Image (tube, helix red, strand yellow):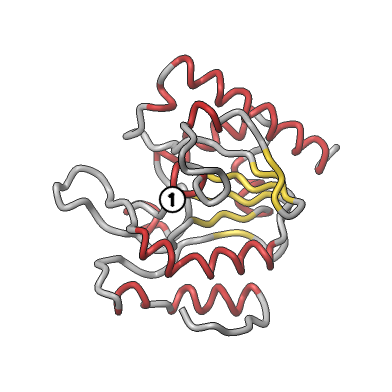
Amino acid sequence: MENREYESLSDLQRLMKECRICLDEGFEIYPPAIFSGVMVAEFMTIGQAPGITEQEADRPFNAGSGTRLFGWLERAGIEENWFRSTQYMTSVTKCYPGRQTSGSGDRVPTRKEQELCRPYLDQEIIFVDPQVIIPIGRLAINLFFPKGLKLQEIIGTQKTIDGRWIIPLPHSSGASRWHQLSENRKLIEKAIFLIKEHRERIFPN
């Protein structure tokens, strides 16, 4: 991605929608970029990459993974329509990466694709300026936590980076077994409690 100054988040978003860098690099992705939210928000979710239903609907976490994610957030006192209309949702890579060659599930974006998209995400964080970032799934979590740690060591914890609270959640896809295990559900409940504490602090009424 070329180095340039962005005048605003809307300027950045326009360039993300127009971006074809990964295609030019030979990756079989399906633009345009998927994201949603307002110019400035207190909460930001960062997923792995859009799925096919997200690409078709042009909104993040549209299908089953969204139902599960917002089920978790609802227990933290966060209602889906409110969150989608007042907060910000994005992902590590912005475009649908397509299916795995085996046909079983969506392809995980390569390290190179993540690197190509990273400047966009960094700029989104700067413009949106969230107090709380919720990385969802391993790719997003790895941006903020050491890669050698297991999810069991990360989910249910929080840390601050540049004055922002980072509270990770596991991937909410139905294909993931991690969140289905009873011992891991307890860790998810701890994460939900932390998110709830910040929601009550930021939005006390």
Q: Which residue has dot 1 on it?
A: 48
Q: Secondary structure at mark 1?
A: loop
Residue farthest toward the right in the current orientation of the protein: 205
The residue shown at (61%, 69%) is 123
Horizontal side, residue 45 vs residue 161: left or right: left
Closer to us: 5 or 29: 5
Q: Amino acid at mark 1?
A: Gln
Query: Which picture quadrant has residue 76?
Result: top right
In the displayed structure image, the side of residue 70 where residue 163 appears, left or right: right
Residue 68, above or below 36: above
User: Residue 198: x and y, percent?
Assistant: 76, 37
Q: Nearer the viewer, residue 25 or 200?
A: 25
Quadrant in the picture for residue 28? bottom left
Q: Is residue 16 left or right of residue 158?
A: left
Q: Is residue 100 visible?
A: yes
| Residue 175 percent coordinates (x, y) | 32, 34
Residue 127 in percent (x, y) is at 68, 68
Q: Mark 1: few, some, or many residues within 10 Å (few <14, many ≥20)?
A: many
